[in-house]
Amino acid sequence: METVLDKEKVEEVLGMIRPALQRDGGDILLMGLEGAIVKVRLTGACSGCPSSTYTLKLGVERHLKAMIPEIEEVITV
């Protein structure tokens, strides 16, 4: 059975992460959900930043997985 993620819950958790990104001049947008994969777009200063992979995997993905264990991966689109 395919995992179906709750979009509102994902948005809620992203809302907790967003202020940290905004302090650095960036932001994050939820672009979609595909099974247990969360698709996001980093914007502003986070877009194209050399640390964006670190931010995505060790910041965003780690926090989302801690709050929503069903998530398998977070990817940028």
Image (tube, rainbow, N blue to C red):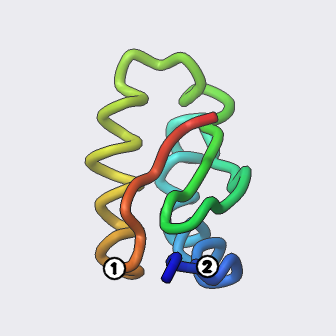
Question: Which residue is found at the position 54% from the left and 30% from the top?
Answer: 46
Foreground pick, 53 / 26: 53
Question: Which residue is found at the position 35% from the left and 66% from the top?
Answer: 63
Q: Which mark is residue 69?
A: 1
Dot 2: element: helix
Q: How many labels does the image show?
A: 2
* Residue at the spot of label 2: 12
Residue 10 x, y percent position in the rendering: 58, 74
In the rendered structure, which amino acid carries the disc numbered 2? Glu
- Say if 41 sits above or below 32 in the image: above
Is 18 situated left or right of 29 in this image? left
Image depth: mark 2 or mark 1 in front: 1
Dot 1: element: loop
Residue 45, by quadrant, is top right
Foreground pick, 73 / 20: 73
Foreground pick, 54 / 26: 54
- Say if 56 sits above or below 34 in the image: above
Is 30 situated left or right of 48 in this image? right
Is 62 situated left or right of 5 in this image? left
Is 38 situated left or right of 52 in this image? right
In the rendered structure, which amino acid carries the disc numbered 1? Pro
Question: Which residue is found at the position 60% from the left and 50% from the top?
Answer: 39
Residue 54 x, y percent position in the rendering: 30, 34
Question: Which residue is found at the position 61% from the left and 47% from the top?
Answer: 40
Question: Which class describes the residues within 10 Å of circle 2: few (<14), some (14-19), or many (20+)?
Answer: few
Distance CA(mark 2)–CA(mark 1) = 15 Å
